Amino acid sequence: MPEQNKNNENGTGTGKKNKVLVVGTSWDQFGGSFLGNSNYWTYELCPNVEGALFKIVDSDYNALLIEQNFFQGFYERSQYSKERSILENLPAGLALVDNDQHILWCNRQFREWSNSNEEIIGKRFFIPLGRPEMRGPDYCPFSKTRLTGQSSSTLLVQKESGRYLQMSAAPVLNEHGKPYNFVVELQDVTDQTIREIKWERLREAGKELANLSKEDVLSRSPQERVNILRAKIGNFTQEILNFASIEIRTLSEKVPNLLEPLLAIGMTEEAKHRTLYTKQEGNGITGWVAFHARSYKMDDSREDPFFIEGIPGSRSSITVPLLYRGKMIGTFNVESQKPQAFDNNDLRLLESFAKDVAQAIHTLDLLSFEQKDSAYRSIEKVYGMAVGPINQILNETARLQMGDLSKHDELLSAFARIRQLTREVQAAFQGFVEKIAVDLPQEISATDCSKYTMLRNKRILTVDADESVGRELSRLLFYYGCTVETVSTGENALKMLETTKYDIFMSDIKLPDMSAFLFFKRVRCAYCKQYNMIPNDTSCDPPDDDPCCPKKEVPFIPFIYMRAFGYDSGHVTTRAAEAGVPKPIFKPFILTQLLDMLKLVITKSNRENKSEGNL
C-alpha cells in the first residue's frame, strides 16, 4: 500500500475519477484495502493539517476523509480560509516549509518567481527558485532558525532572471517550543539592490579616478593623461551606470565660454564637432546647463525647447554640470533613444560621478601646469650646463666644412675634439640628474639610484640594429650615471674600441654584419690588448671553433647579450656561456633585471680585474 499517493490503475471503470483528500498518518484508519481497489476514486494522503488546508485552496477535491485525531485541529484551523485567500494574493512570495525544507504550500507570487514549470509542492525549497546564490547575512537560514528558534534572513540572487529576493524565514513552534515548520517570505528587492551595487561601484570608481594622478599619469605626456582619463570615464559610465551614449565638454582656457569636447561615445560626427558655448539659448541643453550650473533631465525631446540631437533618434537625456569647488569647469551628458529612459536615481548617480570626474580633470590640469613649470626650469638648467660645449662643437664642425683643416693629423685632432666636447655635454646631463632626484620619472626612484651607485660614470657600448633599443637604454641608464653609446653593426663597435675604453659591452645575439659570437671574441681580444697593453696590430684570435681564449691572462670581459624571446638559432648564448658570459637579458627590458645584470658584471669585473693597470 503506498504511503503518500494512492491511485488505482487496475479498475475497469470508465470516466474521470473523483479526487479524495485523506488527512491522516495512515491508510489503515480508512480501510486500506477498500481505498486501494476503487475504480472511481483517486486518493491523496496528507499527514498534517496545515498541508491539507493549503491543498484544499490549491486543488479541487470531490471528497475529504479526516482521521479522528486530526478532526478538531482541522475544524479550528479551517476557519482561517479567508486569511489564506488574502495570503494567496499578496505581492510578497510566501511559502510554508517543513523541517526537511520541503514546500507544503506557496502562494501565487512565489510560483511566479519560481523557475520551475512543474509542481512545486513537495520539492525542496531552493530547487524551484533555481538554486539561487546566497549573499547573506545568513548563509544557512533554515539551519539557523531551527537551532535558535529565531528568524533568519538572506539575500538570494536568481542568476537566470537577474532577480534579487530578500528571504526571511520564521519558525512555527510546536507545544514544546521547538520549530517544526517554517514560514518564508520573499520580497523582490532587485531595483533597490542594483541601485546599491551601482552606488558602491561608483564609489570605487571615484577612488580610482582620485588616484589617477598618483598611479597612472605622473610619467606620461599630457595627451596620454587625457587618453587615460577618457578611457576610465567611458568604461565606468558604460559598465556601472549602463549609459551607452556619453559626451563630456570642458571650458576652454583660450576662448571665453567655449565648451570643448573632451569625450564623445555614441555621438554623431556632427554632434562631436558642434560648437557650443556657455549660453542660456541657442546652445542646446549643454549650453543651458553650463550657463546655470544646474542639472537638466529631459524626458522627451519632442517637447523640449532646448534640445539639440546628439545621437541618432535621441528621445531623452541627462546633462549635469562638472563643478569643482563650486566653479563650473564643464558638462557631462548622456542620451537614450527611449523616451523617459532616466529616472531621478540615474540623475543622482550621474551627479555623484560628475563630482569625481571634475576632481580628476582639475587634478590633471594642475599636474600639467606643474609639469610644464618643472620642465621649463629643468631646460634652463640643462641649457646652462651644455651651451658652452655645444657652441664649441658648432665651431669645430664649421672649421671642417670651411676646409681649414688640410692635414690628416689636424682632421683626427678635430674629430677627437668633437668627440670630447660631445662627452662633456653628456657629463653635463649626468651632473644635472644628481640635482633633480626628486623629479625622477615614476619608474625610477632616488632609492634605486643610491642602490646602484657602482654604475655611476660607467661607459657602455651597445650594439643593436634596432635604434629604439639604444634609445631606451640611454633613457633608463641616464638616471643612474651611465653613458650609453650605441652603434648598429659590429664593425663600427670595433672601430670605436680602438680609441675609447668602455666599462661594459652589450650586444644583440643577431648582428647584421657578423656572428654575434664572433663579435664577442673580437671584443675580448681588443679588451685583452688594452688590458695587457698589447699593440693593436698583434693578432691573437683563437680558432673560430674554440670559444675560449688559450691565454691565461685574459681578463674578465663585462659582456652582456641582449635577446628577444624566441629560438637562438646560432646557439650564441650557449657558446658564450662556455667563455664566461652571463645569461642574456631579454628585451623589452625590465628595469630591475637590467640593473641587476649591470651590477653583476661590474662587480665581477672589479673583483677579478683588481691588479694595477686594470681597465
Image: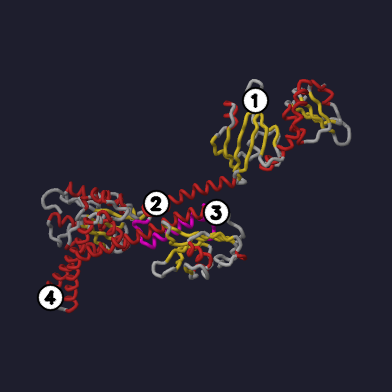
Dot 2 or dot 3, earlier in sequence: 2
> In the image shown, does 209 or 45 lie closer to the viewer?
209
Residue placed most toward the observer, 595 or 168:
168
User: Which quarter shows the N terminus?
Assistant: top right
Badge 2: few (under 14), some or many (20 or more) residues near its Cα, within 10 Å?
A: some
Q: Secondary structure under badge 2?
A: loop
Find residue 109 and report its image quarter.
top right
- How far apart are the two marked residues, 2 and 3, measured between alpha carbons? 25 Å
Q: Do the residues under discs 2 and 4 have CB atoms within 8 angstroms?
A: no
On the image, the x and y values in percent for residue 561 come to 29, 54
The answer to the question of whether label 2 and label 3 lie on touching residues, with beta carbons closer than 8 A, is no
Image quarter (top left, top right, bottom left or bottom right) of the C terminus:
bottom left
Question: What is the span of residues highlighted in magenta in the rendered image?
Answer: 217-245
Q: Is the residue 125 above or below the residue 540 in the image?
A: above
| Prevalent SS, magenta region | helix
Cα–Cα span, label 2 and label 4? 64 Å
Residue under pointer 2:
211
Q: What amino acid is labelled 4 in the image?
A: Lys
Q: Which residue is mark 4?
A: 407
